[in-house]
Image: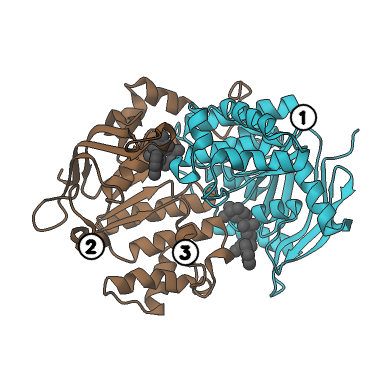
Amino acid sequence: MTALISVRDLTVSYPDHGARRLFGPVPRKTILHGVTLELPKGRITGIVGESGSGKSTLGRALVRLVRPDAGQIIWAGGDRPVDLAPLDEAQLKPLRQDLQMIFQDPMSSLNPRQKIWQLIAWPLRRYGLDASRAAACAALERVHLGAAFADRFAHQLSGGQRQRVGIARAIALNPQFILADEIVSGLDVSSQATVLTLLQDLARDMNLTVAFISHDLSVIRHLCDDLIVLNHGRIVESGPVAQIFDAPSAAETRKLIAAVPLPKPDAEWLT
Amino acid sequence: MSAPVLEISNLSVRLPNDLKVLNTVDLRVEPGEVRALVGESGAGKSMLGKAVLGILPAGLRQTGRITVLGQALDQLPASVRRREVARHVSLIPQDPLTALNPVRPIAAQMTDAMVRIHGWPRRKALARAADLLEQVHIRDVARVLKSYPHELSGGMRQRVLIAAAFATEPKLIVADEPTTALDATVQREILRIIRGLQQETGTTVLFVTHDMGVVAQISQRVTVLFGGRVVEHIDTEALFAGAGQGHAYSRALIRATPDWTRSDAPFAPVPPEVIADLMQEQTR
Ligand SMILES: Nc1ncnc2c1ncn2[C@@H]1O[C@H](COP(=O)(O)OP(=O)(O)OP(=O)(O)O)[C@@H](O)[C@H]1O
Ligand SMILES: Nc1ncnc2c1ncn2[C@@H]1O[C@H](COP(=O)(O)OP(=O)(O)OP(=O)(O)O)[C@@H](O)[C@H]1O
Ligand SMILES: [Mg+2]
Ligand SMILES: [Mg+2]
C-alpha cells in the first residue's frame, strides 16, 4: 500500500500568550510531539482523540496551513516525492488544488455577499477550471442540493445545508487529498448518513485519500479504513479501524469508545 | 402543577417570500425538564430557539404566542422583552466560533453579561466565571480567561459558551447542539455537567441536537420537527423502546444513527417513502 502522505517526526508549536512575560519573545507551546504516520492512497484515515489533543493542528499541518517546527511531510501525489514541511506559500501554490479541506462551518469565513454558486465557482476560476454556473450547479447536485440553492446566500441556509456546500466546493476541484475536520458534527443524522455515504462513494470513485477528523466514534467505525488515536499531541494507537475497535490496546482508546452515547436510554450513562 | 417554563402556541415564522420555516408549532416545557428538539437540517430547530430568544433574523414575521415563565413575550415592548429574556433565558449557540467576539479576551466576554444583568461587581463575576470554567473541566482556567477565542480549540470554545450560559443563572437554556464539536469523552462529561447544573439549579433546557444517542441519554421528552411542523411530542423512553412506539419518521431518524456496536447493520438516510407519507399527513 503506497502512502500519499508520509509524516515523519512532525513537531508543531504555537505562541503561548498565556505564558507571556513582560520582556523577551513570546514563549511557544508544543502541540504535536514528533508525530509519525502514513496516509495510504485511496483510503480514509480517521483521526480521533480528546479535545485539545492536536487533531486539528495535525490536519492543518497536513495541508500546510501551519508551518511545522520540525519533521517531514512527504507528498507523493506528484511526479516525485516532495517534502511539504519547509515550503513557502509560493512553492505550495501549485500543490494547493490537490490539498483540499472542509471544516465544521466552511461558510463562516466566506464572502456573505456572494451567491452559493459563486462561492463554488471562485476556487474553480482560481485554478483555471470551468467556473460556470452550470459547473457549480453540477457540484451542488453531487451533494444533493438542487439548483434552487445556487442563488441563495450562505446565511439563508441551515447549518447542514451549508456543510454540503463546503463539500461541493472541495470536490469540485478534483483533489487527491481531502482533510475533513468535524464535517458532519453539524449535520442531522439523516443528512449525516447521506453525506457519509456520499463521501465514501466519492472517495472510492475519485480514488481520494481522506483524513477524517471526528469526535463521533460510531461514524469513524462505519466510514474509515484506518484509525489514528491522538493523546496530548502523541499517537497512542494506529491501525485498521476494525482491529482497533475489536481490541483497543491504549487506555485512551478504550475511554473514548466507552463514552459514545448509543441510541438507547441508559440510566447509568450520565452518572 | 406549576406553570410551564416555556409555552408556545400556534407559532409560525414566515420568510419574506411567505414560506413558513415554522408552521403552527405548539410546545409546552415543564420546569426542570430537559426537552430534546430533533429533526433534519433545515427543519427549523434553530429558528424555534431564536424565536424563543427573540432574535429572529430581520425580515422574518412571527405569529402565535411565546410565553416564558407566564409572561407573554410578544406582548412586551421590545426593550423590556430584551431585558426579560436576557435575565431568564440563555443560549448556547450552534456555532462556537462566530458566537464569540474575536477581539475580546474570554474573561471580559464571560463577565459582561453578569455585570449587565445582575449588576454584580466584576470581581464576583470573574470568580464565578473561573468557577464555571473549572466545572466544565477546563484544565488551565487562568490561561483560558486571558485567551482570545482563536487561541482555543473548538471543544474549549464550546465549553466556554456552556459555562457562559449558566453564568447568568437563567431559568431556561436553549442549547443549540452544544456538544457537536466535542470528543466523546468530553461530550459525556459536558452532558453530565449540563445535567448536574440543570438538576442543581432546576434550570429547564431545550436541547437541540441531531444525535439520537444524546437524545436517549439526556432528555425526558422529545419533540420531533419536520419542515417547520411538529411531527410528535413523545417520552424518550417510549421512543427508544423499539416496540413500534413513536412516529415512523422518528424511528427512521433512529435508524439513521450510526452505532458502532452494530457494524453489520449500517445506518441509512430516512427513506423517501417515509418522507412522502409524512408530507402527505402534514398537508391533510
Ligand atoms: N492558533 C493557536 N494559537 C495558540 N494555541 C492554539 C492555536 N490553535 C490551537 N491551539 C492550542 O493547541 C491545542 C490543540 O488544539 P487543536 O485545535 O489541534 O485540538 P483538537 O484536538 O482539534 O481539539 P477539538 O477536538 O477541541 O477541536 C489546544 O491546547 C489549543 O488551545
Ligand atoms: N436568515 C434566513 N433567511 C431565510 N431563510 C433562512 C434563514 N435562516 C434559515 N433559513 C431557512 O430556514 C429553515 C430553518 O432553518 P434552521 O436554521 O432553523 O434549521 P435547523 O433545523 O436548525 O437545521 P440544522 O440542523 O442544519 O442547524 C431552513 O430551510 C433554512 O434554509
Ligand atoms: Mg479540532
Ligand atoms: Mg440549527
Disc 1 CB within 8 Å of nearest ligand 4 atom: no
The mark closer to the camera, 2 or 1, is 2
For disc 3, the chain is A
Looking at the rendered structure, which numbered label has been put on residue B202?
A: 1
Closer to the camera in the image, B121 or A118: B121
On the image, the x and y values in percent for residue B19 come to: 69, 70
User: Is residue A166 at all visible to an observer of this figure?
Assistant: yes
Chain B: give its colour: cyan
For disc 2, the chain is A
Q: Are marks 2 and 3 in contact (CB under 8 Å)?
A: no
Chain A: give its colour: brown
Q: Residue furthest right?
A: B1
Looking at the rendered structure, which numbered label has been put on residue A144?
A: 3
Name which residue type carries label 1. Answer: Gly
Residue pointed to by mark 2: A93
Crowding near pointer 1: few (<14 within 10 Å), some, many (20+)?
Answer: some
User: Is residue A224 at all visible to an observer of this figure?
Assistant: no
| Quadrant of ligand 1 in image | top left
* Quadrant including the C terminus of chain A: top right
Name which residue type carries label 3. Answer: His
Type of colouring = by chain
The quarter holding residue A177 reads bottom left
